[in-house]
Image: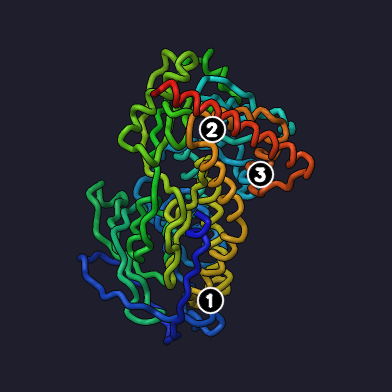
């Protein structure tokens, strides 16, 4: 994964006279010839006269909402296009503590403050996690439809134009610094749900439209391996909900997923029960049933109120940038291995990309080019590559078999492991360790893996 994440993309583009016109109109599909453009340093980019730089953000999730708000506050004329304003993505909904502060999130959109977790092994050995948390620390649990709407509304308040529409495709610029022509179907109140074909001309595009990104396809960004996440929202009795008041559960084992984990995460008045897999997508419903069975005594009698499924990227795309088009969030492939976390990284990448555009355009006064957007990628990879690499290694080592998962759960009982894990998760930094404790951890890890391998060999004998 690391080698893919850190690929660099190079190119040069010549500057040309600016284009100051904007057009939003009804249109019919047309074919445009794609051209390879050359870029040069942003300082030589022309000034935009008579208007500010125009940027379209495709997708209204955490990445799109954060990007649109940052652009609008930075003096960019911003358009955010989102088809499903009430989208309920099948997402565990966990956000780290640092996100609450960094993105100034109000506490009333956080359904639960999780301070306890149970990691449950294939043999149902449960380890309690959370004993190292400080009194003010917690993992926030949100519903995506609530968080996403809040971030979009805040972008609109900052000045972004939020368009209820389905992005279809875009025509590439016919000349350097010419606009991108976006084709989308508008679903505003005037169309009565039927939809109306429209076009929009912009200077740059941020693709925040998820794992099936049409923006990514438009720039031939390449494919990536993906997982299928399946989740059921289950309303349980108040007595049973009390158990999950500040507790989340994670189940590991071949029964719930051969390469991921199952979860029960608390929401406002229900729990989210789900699982995911990359290698056995066709069996996802079987894994979901097993997850429910593992948690049966705590959710029995519950009513399923919503069923959700969605692809989740497993690594960054081969290409995340072309000319004045950049990918962020799931569209770029920013979901971590092992934990499957994506909300924070989506919002953070959207904000970083937008900041690069604001800075490069001098608050919307100059045209941007690929070198401006590349600063976002360089900053992103430098900041988060260690986190992605560590989690990638953990998944390869501990998710490969049930004995390895037993060893993983055994390790999670260690207080030092818990402290390092939570410090890294809550604040999104690879926490510096204590050399002596690191040595102890290494010895314990080797011991756990040796026992796991011995157990695997015995299990293999029994299966012969």
102 above or below 382?
above
Checking the image for residue 165, the label placed there is: none
Query: In the image, residue 13 lies at what x, y percent?
Result: 44, 82
- Can residue 115 be seen by looking at this rendering? no
Total labels: the figure holds: 3
Residue matched to label 1: 365
Query: In the image, residue 187 lies at what x, y percent?
Result: 30, 51
Residue in the foreground of this view, choosing between 328 and 123: 123
Residue depth check, mark 2 versus mark 3: number of the one nearer the observer: 2
The answer to whether marks 2 and 1 mark residues whose Cβ atoms lie closer than 8 Å is: no
Residue matched to label 2: 404
Query: In the image, residue 70 lies at what x, y percent?
Result: 55, 59
User: CA gap, disc 1 to disc 3?
Assistant: 39 Å
Residue 438 relative to residue 115: left or right: right
| Label located before the other in sequence (2 or 1) | 1
- Can residue 244 be seen by looking at this rendering? yes
Residue in the foreground of this view, choosing between 152 and 449: 449
Checking the image for residue 424, the label placed there is: 3
The kind of secondary structure element at disc 3 is helix
7 above or below 281?
below
| Label located before the other in sequence (2 or 3) | 2
The answer to which quarter of the image holds residue 449 is top right
Residue depicted at 56% across the width and 42% down the height? 394
């Amino acid at each position: 994964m690391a080698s893919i994440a850190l690929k660099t993309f190079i190119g040069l583009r010549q500057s040309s006279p600016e284009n100051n016109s904007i057009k939003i109109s009804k249109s019919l599909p047309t074919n445009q010839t794609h051209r390879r453009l050359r870029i040069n340093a942003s300082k030589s980019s022309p000034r935009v006269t008579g208007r500010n730089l125009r940027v379209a953000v495709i997708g209204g999730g955490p990445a799109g909402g954060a990007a649109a708000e940052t652009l609008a506050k930075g003096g960019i004329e911003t358009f955010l296009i989102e088809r499903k304003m009430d989208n309920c993505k099948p997402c565990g909904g966990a956000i780290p503590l640092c996100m609450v502060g960094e993105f100034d999130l109000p506490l009333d959109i956080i359904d639960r403050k999780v301070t306890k977790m149970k990691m449950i092994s294939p043999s149902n050995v449960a380890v309690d996690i959370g004993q190292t948390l400080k009194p003010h620390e917690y993992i926030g649990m949100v519903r995506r439809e609530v968080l996403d709407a809040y971030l979009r509304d805040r972008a609109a308040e900052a000045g972004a134009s939020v368009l209820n529409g389905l992005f279809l495709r875009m025509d590439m610029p016919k000349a350097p610094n010419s606009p991108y022509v976006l084709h989308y179907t508008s679903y505003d109140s005037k169309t009565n749900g039927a939809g109306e074909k429209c076009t929009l001309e912009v200077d740059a595009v941020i693709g925040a439209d998820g794992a099936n990104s049409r923006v990514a396809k438009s720039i031939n960004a390449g494919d990536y391996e993906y997982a299928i996440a399946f989740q059921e929202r289950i309303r349980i009795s108040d007595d049973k909900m009390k158990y999950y008041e500040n507790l989340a559960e994670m189940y590991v084992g071949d029964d719930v997923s051969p390469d991921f984990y199952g979860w029960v995460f608390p929401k406002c008045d229900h729990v989210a029960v789900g699982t995911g897999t990359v290698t056995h997508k066709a069996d996802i419903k079987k894994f979901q049933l097993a997850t429910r069975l593992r948690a049966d005594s705590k959710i029995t009698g519950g009513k399923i109120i919503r069923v959700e499924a969605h692809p989740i990227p497993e690594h960054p795309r081969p290409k995340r940038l072309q000319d004045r088009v950049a990918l962020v969030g799931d569209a770029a492939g920013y979901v971590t291995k092992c934990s499957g976390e994506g909300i924070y990284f989506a919002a953070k990448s959207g904000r970083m990309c937008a900041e690069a555009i604001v800075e490069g355009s001098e608050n919307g006064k100059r045209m941007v080019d690929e070198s401006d957007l590349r600063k976002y990628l360089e900053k992103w990879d430098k900041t988060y590559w260690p986190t992605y690499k560590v989690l990638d290694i953990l998944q390869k080592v501990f998710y490969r078999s049930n004995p390895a998962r037993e060893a993983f759960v055994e390790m999670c009982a260690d207080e030092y492991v818990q402290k390092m894990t939570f410090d890294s998760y809550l604040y999104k930094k690879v926490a510096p360790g204590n050399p002596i404790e690191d040595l102890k951890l290494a010895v314990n890890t080797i011991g756990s893996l040796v026992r796991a391998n011995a157990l695997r060999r015995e299990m293999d004998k029994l299966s012969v």
